Amino acid sequence: MQKILAISSLLTISLSVYFLIFQNVYGNGIRNNFGIDYLPPLNLNDTSLSLNVEFQPSMAKSNTNEKKSLIFKLLDIDKNITYVPNLYTINILKNDFNNGKITEKVFLNGSFFSKNGTLILQFDSNKTNYINNNKEIHKYNIDKDYNGKVIRSDENGVIVIDKPDLDSGVYHLKVNVNLTNATAGLNNKDIILKFDSYLSLGNILDMDIGSHDKRLTILSFNDKIVGYGYDQQSKKISFEIPFKYNMTRIEEGFIYIHMEIKIPNTFNEFFNTKEYLTTINGIDHSKISSASVSVDRYSNSSNLTVHFILDSNSLFKLTKEREQHPEENSDTTLRFSLQPK
């Protein structure tokens, strides 16, 4: 017997969840979240369970080796209890941008067990985690054939990811959480919770323009910054990120773009400018939406921040523009520019 449960996301996005009694629970979160996602709680015998997935940190700095983690935690929302699943089966696809095309490639695929319920996949480019007191390394390598073997965490729930490296971008997570009778205590049979979501690991890029005093910081909350530059003559700053112009997803309202550029008060040509000319895909931002660009001069006296924010309506207009002029918009990126007016 199958029941359809209507539920609301903690992030105010309504989703559909299908509950096959005593067997499977499906949670479909087809949206782009910034570094953290609380998938909508599933009500099982009056127990509300939600999968928390989180990147730490939520944004990665370009050209910097730093320890990063992807954390999974199954929570009882009402009692604030972390369950200890029998198994996490995780399949992750990552958007790959190459030669002007965006494709989904397998990033990670394996079965994992965490002793305390919280699973921490730790990506360490410097390999500092390979030494521990127990001389036992709990690690995973995508190139190795584990033949269905379950990889167990250390006492802290950590599994070191030997390969691949974790980089900024959009990740498609398909997670099966298996609860056994002893663990779940919810009914007499095993339960498999099936979650599907997109998660973004943001990108921070420092850009020097001639001197350290003119260092700009560009932040992308959605994807990796794949192109950037500064034109000395026109004083134009430009940058871009990969973007799939998928009208179906845009119309469903699951995509939200947020970019920032921070300008220090030592960069006089920009900091002291009263007005800016800002474009998105070569179009003046006001023709897309008056709210798509905003300038914050007051939150921090040492720099000003220019925000580029695109909701579904703005992305819909940009996609229609591309369809009308395909010869001028053959790439798969979103392009932003800023210059004194």
Image: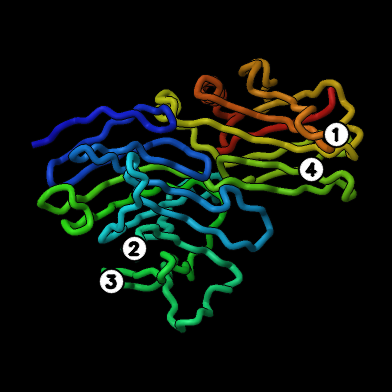
Task: Say what amino acid the circle numbered 3 marks.
Answer: Lys
- Could you say whether the residue bearing mark 2 is in a helix, strand or loop? strand
Q: Residue furthest left?
A: 1
Q: Position of residue 320 (x, y in %)?
A: 51, 21
Label 3 or label 2, whichever comes before in sequence order: 2
Label 2 or label 4, whichever comes before in sequence order: 2
| Image marks 1 and 3: residues in contact by CB distance under 8 Å | no
Q: Which residue is mark 1?
A: 235
Q: Which mark is residue 110?
A: 2
> Could you say which quadrant of the image residue 118 lies in?
bottom left
- Could you say whether the residue bearing mark 3 is in a helix, strand or loop? loop
Task: Say what amino acid the circle numbered 4 marks.
Answer: Leu
Q: Residues within 10 Å of mark 4 (few under 14, many from 20)?
A: some
Q: Which mark is residue 216?
A: 4
Locate the N terminus by quadrant: top left
Q: Which residue is mark 3?
A: 149
Task: Say what amino acid the circle numbered 1 marks.
Answer: Lys
- Could you say whether the residue bearing mark 4 is in a helix, strand or loop? strand
> Could you say which quadrant of the image residue 109 lies in?
bottom left
Is 252 left, or right, of 315 in this rendering? left
- Residue at the spot 55% in from the left edge and 59% down from the top edge: 68
| Image marks 1 and 2: residues in contact by CB distance under 8 Å | no
Q: Which mark is residue 270?
A: none
